[in-house]
Each structure stands twice: as structure tokens, then as C-alpha cells.
Amino acid sequence: MRDVAARPGSGDGDRPREVLRVRAFALFWSATTIRAFGGSIAGVAFQILIVTVITASPFEIGVLSALSVVPYLFLGLIVGALMDRWKRQRTLMVTSIGRAVVLGIVPILLLLDALDFWSLAAVILLLGILTLFADSAAQPLLPHIVPRSSLVMANARLGQSETVAGTAGPALGGALLNLVGAPILFAFDAAINAVSAVLQSRIEVDEAVPSPRAHGRHIGHDIVEGMRFTYRHRTLRPLALSVHIWFLGNSIVATVFAVFVLRELNLEPWAFGLALAFGGFGGFLGALLAPALGRRLGAGRAILLGRMLVIVPWAAMAVAPISASSDLALLLPLISAAQFVYGLAMGIEDANDIGYRQAVAPDAIQGRMNSTIRTMNRVIFFFGALLAGSLATFFGYPLTLGVAAIIFTAAASVVGFSSLRSARHDDLEGLES
């Protein structure tokens, strides 16, 4: 199965160039970046509202947290199939407008003193559904905006801006919340999404019209076809399995790391924030290095490098002789270094992973391929988080982080012992299923 002609610049002679000089990508990047900043700012505001305004119980907090994942669990595969038949550019515009409207409702509810658990739950659920549609449209749209040879660089630029947004956004959101209050902050975030919709609308892109379904076929057949393509493909299968295993390990560290550091090791909140900032810097640097590493090592070995690097910080945290009585001069450098390497690994592998997926899959199945991988990742993350709680309860935090390091090792092994290891971004054989 080939889709060479469907992509601009898909020939061997292409040379990667700075994608921000491509007008369509510059607009796409700008819209995505300001939306990411808005999401990070709103994330802090939502957390504060949950604790201070509606005074949610621990059970209610858990429900609100789960609502952001629920759309992926129940709609992920369906939306992915729709994205292979709908206009992805139009979907991104509509979802940005939808987010602006939903976020604009929050200040009205606050001013009317009508914000309660149920209304906030409805807002979070609607935002989760809109984000699902936006994510499902963005990844398959990108190969229409930049040449195939520039996909890794494009994903690296997106990763860099999202890392900065994820690092600086919460601090900015906390400061703005204190300065202007929650109603104005949410109105500001609604305006950001409106601007994002305007930027998105200015992108000129040609999207192929999908062929009509054969008689007797329905969306279920489309979903199955996407899953078969993903898990039968020579290089996509090990890529998907590896990232699924990686998500299991990541669900464990994401669940227990903060509790271990803040509660078990008694690290001060300011020191914890500083360590997370090192993770953001590592992620930015990894995304900066990702295109060059992908060209020099090839896609498979660059992904393998990232998978191997991520083992190091959690294995070190598992065996390091640290406790609540450890000196801050030991704890802070260790935890900061662990976060830096963790971020560096993700920055390197994300751009190469996503770029390779986008290059290897035909346009007609991009939405389903991405949604298959993304939905399975979130299902695994959901159950992995539950597993992490049980492991930490019965075996303690260091051993739980050690289990995560073993799982990350398994994820790297899938890449290292499969045909994916020798895959390259410029290898047109990867376009064959």
C-alpha cells in the first residue's frame, strides 16, 4: 500500500528545511502553541476551582480527573475513523471555536455563583471531547502541511513549544489567577482559543476526498481496518507495542513520583517545582536534538535511544540510598537529574516516533492508525495507574519505580529486537504495509 503522491515533497531528493519558514506550518504551529499555553493556564485554574470553589471531596476529584480520559476510552476509535472521512482542517477550526464557547461559559457560571460539581464536570467532559477531536485531526493533517522529509522537524518544533507551555503555563496561570481572578482568566483563555481558530482558518491545505464506503460497510469496518493495518504492519506493529508498554511504565511513574518525592522524601514544594523545571528543559533539549538524531541514526535507532534513556532515571531512583532524612543537597540534584533525563528521552523519541508514523501510513488511514495507538495507550495508562497504587501500597515507592524501569526496558527491547530498529525516515519501503 503506497501513498507517495498524496504527500507534498515525498520524494527521496527532498532536504529538510526549517519548517517555520513554511507559511502553512507557521500558522499551524502558532495556533497549536497558543492553544497549549491556554490549556496549561486553564489547567491550573481548574485545579484551584475544584479545591477552593466547589470544595470537591477526594472521590469527586477522582471523578473529575477521570472525565478527561473517558472520551478517549469510549470515543477514541470512532473519532479516529471519522477523521479519515471528515475535513481535518475544518475539524480543528470547529473544535477551537467550541473550546472558546465552553471556556466562556465558566466565567458566567462564576459570576452567577452557579458553578458546582455537576456543571464543572460537564465543562471538563465537553473540553475532553473537543480535545479528542482536535488531537485526532491534528496528527493526520500535519503531513498535508509539510513535506514528508520535514515531519520530524515539524513534530520537534511542536514538541518544543508544548514543553515550554507545559513548564511556563502553570506558573503563568497561577500568577494571572492572583492578579485578575478566575472569571477574567477563563475569559482570556476563551479568547486564546478564538485566536487559535482564526489562525487555523488561514491555513491553505488540500485534503483528498475519501472514497465512499462500499455497500454493506459501516464505521465498525473502518475501525477494524485501521487496527489491522496498525498491528499487521512490519514496523508499525513493534512501534505500537513498544509505545503501549512505555505507557504502562509511564502510568506508574506519573502516579507515584510526586507522592514519593513530596510525602515520602519530604521534598519542599519549591524544590519539587525546580526539579520539574529541569524536566521541561530536558524535553526542550531533546526535541531540539531529535531531527539531527533521526537523520544520523535513523528513525528506529533514535526511538530506541529515547526508550533506553528513560530507563536510567527510574532505575536510579529505585536503588538510590535516599529517604526523608537525606540532605537536600543530595535529594535535589538527584531528582532534578532524573527529571532532566526523563524529559530528554521523551523529547528525542516523541518527534521521531510521531514523525515516522505520519510518514509510513497512507493518508486514507492516518486517523485510524493514530487513534488506535492513542486509545490503547490511554486504556493502558488508566489501568496502569490503578496498578501503581497497589504496588506502592504493598511494596513501597522505590520498588514500584524499579518495576517501572523494568517495564521501560521491555519497551526498549521490543524496538531493539524488531525490524523497527533499522527503519529510517527516508526509507520509502516503510510506505508498504
Image (cartoon, rainbow, N blue to C red):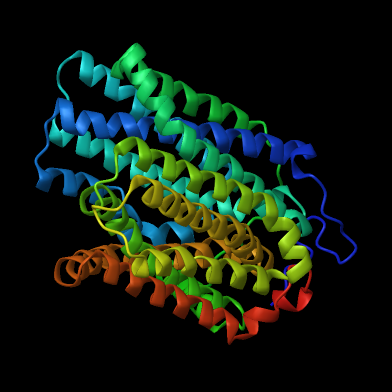
Residue at 56% from the left image edge and 55% from the top image edge: 344
Q: State the image coordinates of residue 136 (x, y, percent, origin top left).
A: 49, 53
Q: State the image coordinates of residue 390 (x, y, percent, origin top left).
A: 17, 68
Count numbered badges in the picture. Answer: 0
Residue at 23% from the left image edge and 38% from the top image edge: 122
Residue at 35% from the left image edge and 25% from the top image edge: 174
Query: Is residue 187 or residue 382 the one in the foreground?
Result: 382
**Residue that extends furthest to the bottom in the rendered view of this protein:** 417
Q: State the image coordinates of residue 220 (x, y, percent, origin top left).
A: 40, 70
Instruction: Work out which quarter of the rendered image holds the N terminus and state it.
Output: bottom right
In the rendered image, the vertical position of residue 181 relative to residue 393, given as above or below: above
Instruction: Work out which quarter of the rendered image holds the C terminus and state it.
Output: bottom right
Whether residue 73 sits left or right of residue 156 in the image: it is: left
Whether residue 218 sits left or right of residue 45 in the image: it is: right
Whether residue 358 sits left or right of residue 128 in the image: it is: right
Whether residue 334 appears in this view of the structure is yes
In the rendered image, the vertical position of residue 221 relative to residue 93, given as above or below: below
Residue at 41% from the left image edge and 52% from the top image edge: 335
Query: Is residue 331 or residue 28 the one in the foreground?
Result: 331
Q: State the image coordinates of residue 191 (x, y, percent, origin top left).
A: 46, 21
Q: Would you identify the image quadrant in which residue 264 lies? A: bottom left
Query: Is residue 87 or residue 301 the one in the foreground?
Result: 301
Q: Would you identify the image quadrant in which residue 106 lies? A: top left
Whether residue 84 appears in this view of the structure is no
